[in-house]
Amino acid sequence: MLKSYFKIAFRNLIKNRNYALINIIGLSLGMAAVFVITRFVFEELSYDQDNQFKNRIYRVYHDGKEKSGATQAILTTAIEDKFPEIEKTVRIGKYWQDYNLIRYENRIEKVEPFYFADPEIFDVLNIPLLQGNTETCLDDPDAVVITRQFGEKYFPGQNPFGKILTIRYGNSFYDRKITAILDEIPKNTYLNPDVLLPLKFLEQVEQSDLFTNWGFNSVTTLFLLKKNAEIEQLTAKLNNFVSALAPEWFKPDYRLQPLTRVHLYSSDISCRIGEYGDIAQVRLYGAIALIILIIACINFINLSLVQSSRRIKEIGVRKVVGAGRSALVYQSLLESILLSVISLAFAFLLLKLLLPFANQIFNRQMQLSLTENLSFFLVMIFIALLVGLVCGGSTALIFSSLKPVTLFSNKQIYSSGNSLFKRTMLAFQFVTFCGLIIASLVIRNQMIYLSGKQLGYNTEQVMVIMRPPGDTNKKYNVFASQLQNHSAIQSVTISSFVPPVFGNWITQSLEKDENMEWVIADTSYLSALDMKLVAGRNLRENEPGAILLNETAYKKRFSNQPFTPDMEIGTDNKKRIVGVVQDFHTHALYQKIDPLFIENAGIDDFIACISIKLSAGQIPEGIQQAKQIWQKIYPNDLFSFQFIDEKFDQIYQNDEQFAQLISFFTFLAVVIACMGLFGLISFTAVQRTKEIGIRKTLGATIQNIALLLCREYLIIGMISFVFAVPILYYLMEIWLQRFAYHINLDWWIFALSGLIAFSIAALTVSFQAIKAATANPVESLRYE
């Protein structure tokens, strides 16, 4: 019996190969997109799932006005042996620079940031060692632990265990002995350090009360709890204990977060270490995958129904000769599952081709290994079988329930004009692909707006170098002076902060209970960044107490008052306002411009950035000249720079990736929907061949016939667009609220989206409709 079902299924696939091909291509594309997103979702959900203590490890964070993952180093010392629920604690610190420097074989190299940790890190996070002892390798302040990959890179052909690695911290270089080699750490792990130093090293080199002061939030703290510990009770006990122990001004607001939630549920927590994702992003991509799969399934169901309507008499004959309802259902299910399995094979091939692109977009290193990703492959098979069952079952239930007398009658069981079910599914497809076109246009226009918005300063041709620790004014002045002797370099400035994120972002309160952003800069700051004064003058050398306000600060403090020289601001710490600078964006466009003042004071204490404005057309020469001078003035420091516009590109990278994904999925959804639409209009043309011939004989024009065939689909498309507009307006408003500065949702965006959607649908159905309308009416009247 099963063999007979297979023979009939293959025979029908070959007989209806055009519809089968449309179904296979549509399902393959849909499944491939779903599998790419599913692989990403699996990757995100897999973080720290292999840790044997995953359900007992918690991160401590502050749940105050602003959530922060940085806690006090004194916390674990203070609570030691005071809480029986806590089995172990570990503190982890990070050197908060974009990079660190190491020295070996008389060379200086830039490496990823260092981490510092207590020895308990190996017990809590299950970090494997190739060489060394987990109990002793971080006991000595002069120790350092590296990964196997790090050792292979910097000690090629050697065993680095026991060798000396020279690292820079602050202004000095330190020789550290390699006491352990880490085995390869899975990428989906909370912490993935290349270099790990003892936390005791910080105690040794920091000349401050970093480890004894409740005011320093300097480390990430993890608790390994005993089984069955009550989290809420422990949190309350912890806060009460610290409140009684710490100074009165310190208000503990600790909360505990499970390790398994740290990766995806920390977007609102600052001062984080490790790699982070976003559960909202995972859910969004999951929803997109589901929508694409539904579109592909709707195509499958619609085309299966129209194919089945051509086999009505076959179904009737089989029922007359004794075939039961279950036999007809089995046959339909087998054909659908067969199509789905074939589509699965092609989808897997597409997945392998798309995975490198997906890794680039998602910034992940996803792989397809059967042993490591068995659950993912099982989900792929499950999705394929589910699609086959749902789509085949829908068709089978409709036709197997009909009586033979109905099947042999001339009444049309299913056609393009009398099925509410088909129209509803078709409308859903139209709503979806109209919505995706709208979303794609809105997101792309916002990205264009971000890249083209005037920020109040020059973002191009300005390279920023982090000032070396321990640099002196004397050395900097020599460096700046030599730079300005070259035609490729227009100007040089030094400052505490350069937008959007270079240097130290600091605030100071001039008015009571009101903080302002504070930039410390020399007198070349405005000219180097092409900032404009709207009133007053620039800062001068040796002018203590003189400041520049931005427009926002001036309007907030002085409202509509005209500017006059030497206006004052501040209560206890009075400042003279010598000028007002045009508002400029100190951060990305997610944030509004806040009140800010610029001051030429305390340079040695705060300066972190050297900005060099290069001449247009001479950027490579300017970089080379700056590098040569740097290596002479700062021989022990690596020449490393970044342009301001490149930093903005990094900040908007996630949104740019999102825009690319939406564009890709929009294209995919449109292709799948159009394939289904093409199949339906082709079937409609065949079903109405005789009618078309009669109408043409009676004088109907090609335009009349084409409109007759297309009208229903175009009307459904227009109605669907009307439904899609308010839904997408609401969703895009929510998305745009992420940006303090964004485009308006103008009518033309929706009009253009509707025009694009209508044009695509019209072209799809018109091609087949015109082909049917231009056929010879003599041939049409011979139909049936």
Image (spheres, rainbow, N blue to C red):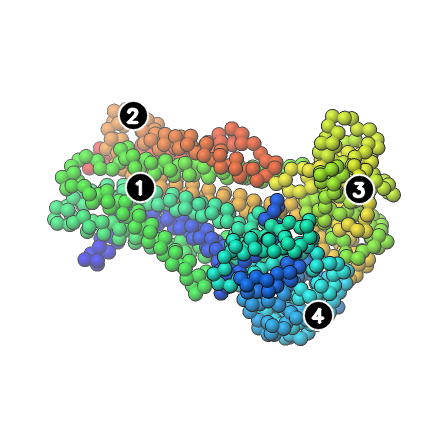
Q: Mark 1 and mark 3 in contact? Answer it, CB < 8 Å.
A: no
* Nearest-to-viewer mark from 1 and 3: 3
Furthest-right residue in view? 542
> How far is mark 2 from mark 1, CA to CA?
29 Å
> How far is mark 1 from mark 4, CA to CA?
71 Å
What percent of the width, then of the height, locates residue 642?
69, 51
Q: In screen coordinates, is 461 left or right of 784? A: right
Q: Amino acid at mark 1?
A: Asn
Q: Residues within 10 Å of mark 4 (few under 14, many from 20)?
A: some
Q: Amino acid at mark 2?
A: Ala
Q: Residues within 10 Å of mark 1 (few under 14, many from 20)?
A: many
Q: On the rendered image, what quadrant is the N terminus found in?
A: bottom left
Q: Residues within 10 Å of mark 2 (few under 14, many from 20)?
A: some
What residue is pinned by disc 3? 599
> How far is mark 2 from mark 4, CA to CA?
93 Å
Residue 18 visible in image:
no
For this rendering, which residue is in front, 203 or 354?
A: 203
Q: Secondary structure at mark 2?
A: loop
> How far is mark 1 from mark 3, CA to CA?
69 Å
Q: Secondary structure at mark 1?
A: helix
Which label was assigned to residue 142?
4
N-terminal of the two: label 3 or label 2?
A: 3
For this rendering, which residue is in front, 440 or 278?
A: 278
Which label was assigned to residue 700?
2
The residue depicted at 33 percent of the width and 41 percent of the height is: 679
Which label was assigned to residue 302?
1
Q: Amino acid at mark 3?
A: Glu
N-terminal of the two: label 2 or label 4?
A: 4
N-terminal of the two: label 2 or label 1?
A: 1
The residue depicted at 75 percent of the width and 50 percent of the height is: 609
What percent of the width, then of the height, locates residue 133?
60, 74
